[in-house]
Amino acid sequence: MSEDERITRIEDVIQPVLRDHGLELVDVDWRAHGARGVLRVFIDKPGGVIVRDLERVSREMGDLLDVADLIPERYDLEVSSPGLDRQLRTDREFRWARGKRVRCVLVEGGDVIGRLVDVDAGRLVLDTDGGPREVRREQVRRARLDAEVPWPRQG
């Protein structure tokens, strides 16, 4: 089985657990490291995940993955939230990021920062301070969430 097929089958096994807990799959990453691999699963929900979410789904996913025997070698399962400045690479990650602030570093230089309002295979549409801006996907060198941290008021 190819690595892409393995990831797809892993996603099929863990999706019902996530749905049962009102969680959304952001990304799955498999890294073979010698005799022991690492399976990283990134999840989210409106308002963000809490430690209890991570603990609960980690146990349930681990049990299901062991029964499904999709990873015959020894591995560590890491379940986490995507992070405040998550890099966006795949179509699924861009679709997940709709409505969030995104920073796109462009191939020809400069950044476009705005709320991601639309995404498809060929383009992104961001609501920037200057209004809506369409960016062709091939123009984007790198994209990531642009952390929106509420700073405490002074005084």
Image (cartoon, rainbow, N blue to C red):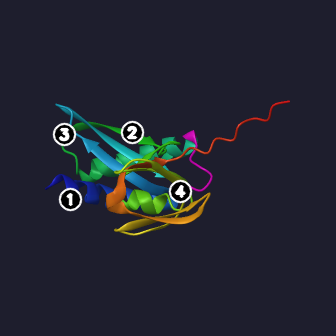
Circle 3 or circle 2, nearest the eye: 2
Which three-letter amino acid code belongs to the residue tagged 4? His
Could you say which quadrant of the image residue 2 lies in?
bottom left
Q: Position of residue 11 (x, y in %)?
A: 33, 58
- Identify the main secondary structure in magenta: loop
- First along the sequence among labels 4 and 2: 4
Mark 1 secondary-structure assignment: helix
Mark 3 secondary-structure assignment: loop
Which three-letter amino acid code belongs to the residue tagged 1? Glu
- First along the sequence among labels 3 and 2: 3
Is residue 144 in view from this perspective?
yes
* Labelled disc at residue 73: 3
Q: Which residues are magenta?
A: 45-51
The residue that appears at 56% across and 47% down in the rendered structure is 49
Could you say which quadrant of the image residue 151 lies in?
top right
Are dots 1 and 2 in contact, CB under 8 Å?
no
Residue denoted by label 2: 78
